Structure formats: structure tokens, C-alpha cells
Image: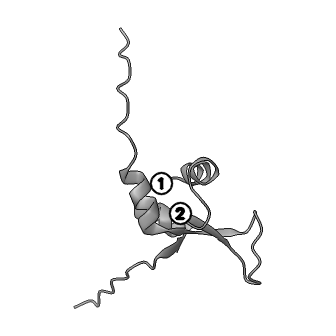
């Protein structure tokens, strides 16, 4: 019998784990970060020296991103072409 290990993500996850858990694409995450999300609420820049810059790696608050996804309005139906 094989051992099964189940991991539970922490409150803050890396971009690659966010992509795996939500199915979001890299550009979707980047656009949401630039236009919709607030630093400290949905994401944080982090750095080893404790002084992150705008180009530092980001971590994402998984529950806040899931809530953002849940609150998205329904897509508008596309016009049908003849």
C-alpha cells in the first residue's frame, strides 16, 4: 500500500501554487494584480531582506482571491453570428 500525503496550502501561496489551485493563468493574475487587487489584501510583495520592491516576488492570499473569483459577475452572452 502506498503512503498518501495530503497538504493543505497556507494562507499565503506562491504564484505557481495559486495557478495550480485556481486554474488562473499568469497573465490573468498579473492583470488582476495591476487593475483589481489591493496589495496587502489579495497579494503581497516579499523579499528576503524584508524590504520588498515593486518587482519583488508576490505571494497571494488564497481565500481573498477565491472570494474575488466568486464575486465575478456572470459573463455576457456572445452575439451569435449567422
Most distant residue in the top direction: 82
The count of marks equals 2
Q: Tell me: residue 26, above or below residue 47.
A: above
Residue drawn 22% across and 91% down? 1
Tell me the residue at 36%/52% (across/down): 70
**Helix, strand or loop status at disc 1:** loop
Q: Residues within 10 Å of mark 2 (few under 14, many from 20)?
A: many
Circles 2 and 1, Cβ within 8 Å, touching? The answer is no
* x then y, percent, for residue 21: 41, 65
Instruction: Please tell me whether residue 20 is drawn above or below residue 32 in the rendered image.
Output: below
Q: Compared to 27, does 49 lie above or below?
A: below
Q: Quadrant of residue 15?
A: bottom right
- Pair 2/1: label in front: 2
Residue found at x 60% / y 54%? 33
Residue extending farthest left: 1
Give the x, y percent position of residue 16: 54, 66
Which residue was labeled with disc 2? Answer: 42
Quadrant, the C terminus: top left
Amino acid at each position: 500500500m502506498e503512503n498518501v500525503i495530503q497538504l493543505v496550502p497556507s494562507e499565503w501561496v506562491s504564484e505557481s501554487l495559486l495557478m495550480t489551485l485556481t486554474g488562473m493563468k499568469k497573465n490573468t493574475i498579473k492583470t488582476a494584480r495591476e487593475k483589481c487587487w489591493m496589495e496587502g489584501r489579495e497579494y503581497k510583495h516579499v523579499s528576503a531582506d524584508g524590504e520588498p520592491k515593486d518587482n519583488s516576488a508576490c505571494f497571494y492570499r488564497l481565500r481573498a482571491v477565491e472570494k474575488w473569483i466568486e464575486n465575478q459577475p456572470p459573463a455576457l452572452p456572445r452575439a451569435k453570428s449567422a
